[in-house]
Image (cartoon, rainbow, N blue to C red):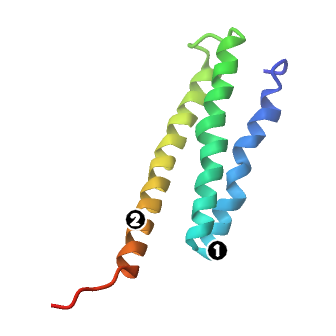
């Protein structure tokens, strides 16, 4: 882990947290989209790259540290799909309120 500087690389995973708190405070669609983008980069793309580096460095798949990181990735995927659902529902709600209503 030290040779690969994993602790330094893992701090990048926390980059999405300030944006999450911003979304909680403001609840604007723009901030939610920004949070989703940063979450995608920091947790959905970056984390598998870290796992791949560990595997390339010779860490066995059965290593408990690798299993914990993999479980953390699965948790992030669960959160990611919830974020996408919120974005989708927000987009659908916005389009429903902005579309002109037909009179019958």
Q: Which sits earlier in the primary sequence, circle 1 or circle 2?
A: 1
Q: Residue at x 63, y 59 (%)?
A: 34
Quadrant of the image containing the C terminus: bottom left
Give the secondary structure at mark 1: helix
- Residue 36 in the image: state x and y as whole percent: 58, 54
- Residue 66 in the image: state x and y as whole percent: 62, 22
User: How many angstroms separate mark 1 from mark 2 (CA)?
Assistant: 19 Å
Taking depth in this image into account, of 92 and 59 the one nearest to the observer is: 92
Q: Nearer the viewer, mark 1 or mark 2?
A: 2
Q: Which residue is mark 2?
A: 89
Residue at the extreme bottom: 103
Taking depth in this image into account, of 16 and 40 the one nearest to the observer is: 40
Q: Quadrant of residue 100?
A: bottom left
- Residue 17 in the image: state x and y as whole percent: 68, 55
Specify the label residue 25 is tagged with: 1
Give the secondary structure at mark 2: helix
Residue at the extreme left: 104
Taking 39 as reference, is 19 above or below it?
below
Q: Residue at x 68, y 61 (%)?
A: 19
Taking 22 as reference, is 34 above or below it?
above
Q: Residue at x 64, y 33 (%)?
A: 47
Q: Residue at x 44, y 68 (%)?
A: 90
């Amino acid at each position: 882990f030290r040779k690969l500087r994993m602790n330094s690389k893992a701090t990048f995973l926390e980059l999405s947290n300030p944006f999450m708190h911003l979304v909680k405070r403001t609840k604007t669609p723009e901030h939610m989209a920004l949070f989703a983008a940063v979450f995608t980069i920091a947790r959905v793309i970056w984390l598998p790259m870290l796992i791949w580096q560990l595997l390339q460095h010779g860490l066995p798949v059965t290593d408990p540290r690798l299993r914990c990181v993999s479980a953390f990735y699965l948790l992030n995927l669960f959160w990611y799909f919830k974020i996408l659902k919120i974005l989708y529902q927000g987009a659908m709600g916005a389009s429903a309120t902005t579309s002109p209503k037909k009179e019958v």
